[in-house]
Image (tube, grey):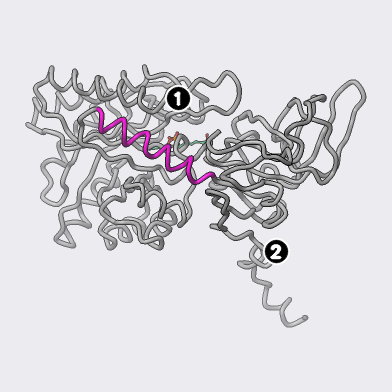
Amino acid sequence: HGTSRVNEQGNLEIGGCDTTQLAAQYGTPLYVYDEAQIRSKCRDYVEAFRKSGFAFQVAYASKAFCTMAMCKLVEEEGLSLDVVSGGELYTALQAGFPVERIHFHGNNKSLDEIVMALDAKIGCFVVDNFYELHLLDHLAAERGEKVSVLLRVTPGVEAHTHEYISTGQVDSKFGFDVKHGQALEAMKFAHESNHLHLLGVHSHIGSQIFETDGFIVAVQKLTELLGAAKDSFGFLPEVLNVGGGFGIRYVDGDTPQPAETYIKAITDTVKAELNARHIPLPELWIEPGRSIVGDAGTTLYRIGSQKEIPNVRKYIAVDGGMTDNLRPALYQAEYEAAIANKMNEAATEVVSIAGKCCESGDMLIWDVKLPAAVAGDILAVPSTGAYGYAMSNNYNRIARPAVVFVKEGESELVVKRESYADVVGHDLLPKRAQLQR
Ligand code: LLP
């Protein structure tokens, strides 16, 4: 992927940096991000929209990987930012992200989060349900403000993806239901409110989607809804947001389309459907997360123990696991791997990569072909840039790894490795125990 290559020493190099040196300098596990690769992904979407002639915003879905450094990079690329919590919003604000380009998602935003976003004067709330709609209307009225909103609707589309990450179907916790008329009712309320400015509608049909057909059907449903809103109360949209979910390649057999293919399918459909309904073309927004950062990230581990069960399996354990990459345990997600210091050696054995957590399910990769490995070798797992660090955790009180950005032979620490002191940092000893000390 990206700027990776094998250098003269036979080591894996990313962004001009030898990964074995990165491992030595920053320790392992280590998340390494190829900065040029992230930027090129951002530009692919922007380019594709430029070609379409639509006014647009590409909002990076920060849930995939949200750090201040990433917010900064996204700002530099001219993208907008989708946040889903007070924590992500705080990260963006701390990074100085332009507030008018922040969109706030979430199916249960708390009062505190909403007030925080109102105070910050973010660009747009993506309202998920009637409770939030009425709360926001009330708060905006109290403050004498007019707040821009998109309504998230569930168009009833099931994308071909893992059950847990498809969100556009009818039976979903997210969004206003289209089929039973709730979406139209919510739109009417927002449209007629003196304190809400209804920009348009939003849908997100799932994640890690390879085909364009799901997006096409979603756009058809959204434009049907817009047609109904026009006919019943004269609403014309300024914005149509079709969410994220564009797939990436993790292993052989994954067949994502180039950004341009998805965008062309979406823009062509929007154009045809809205023209047919005599609705002026709105701004088009998308929210890619995984496809911006996923294949720009590689995790480096140090190999430790091994266990061979004759004629059954060889386990090779690394110094991380479900604490830095929950996806295999949660979704049976598959990854490839390489030994970063043995890139020119032939892959001779099939092994399974275990994490170090006290749990049998803590397996990173089943049955991967690698050169013979010994303790101290560096294992590189590519395509871990999305939902890796983002879903990292302290199970077994394991400290979270560091994150570095690499580019043109230079590396920069963007998230410090957690220390054990950080891990116990929020613990408090009960008072009586303190007296005994
Ligand atoms: N917009 C909305 C409203 C979303 O819910 C999501 C993802 C995105 C955009 C970005 O989707 P992306 O382009 O990254 O596919 N943890 C799971 C993925 C959960 C995605 C949740 N929503 C995983 O590791 O596969």
Would you say the beta carbon of the disc 1 residue lies within 8 angstroms of ligand 1? yes
In-image side of 372 versus 32 (left or right) = right
Q: Residue at x 14, y 24 (%)?
A: 228
The correct choice, above or below, for 189 with respect to 25 in the image is above
Task: Label 1, secondary structure: give it.
Answer: loop
x, y percent for residue 51: 25, 29
Q: CA distance from mark 1 to mark 2?
A: 39 Å
Residue 337 lies in the magenta stretch? no
The residue beneath circle 2 is 420
The residue beneath circle 1 is 209
x, y percent for residue 35: 49, 46
Q: Residue at x 41, y 51 (%)?
A: 73
**Which region of the structure is painted magenta?**
34-51
Q: Quadrant of residue 417?
A: bottom right
The correct choice, above or below, for 220 with respect to 421 in the image is above
Q: Main secondary structure of the magenta part?
A: helix
Task: Farthest residue to the bottom: give it.
Answer: 435
Q: Which mark is residue 86?
A: none
In-image side of 158 versus 177 (left or right) = right
The correct choice, above or below, for 337 with respect to 138 in the image is above
| Image quarter in which the C terminus is found | bottom right
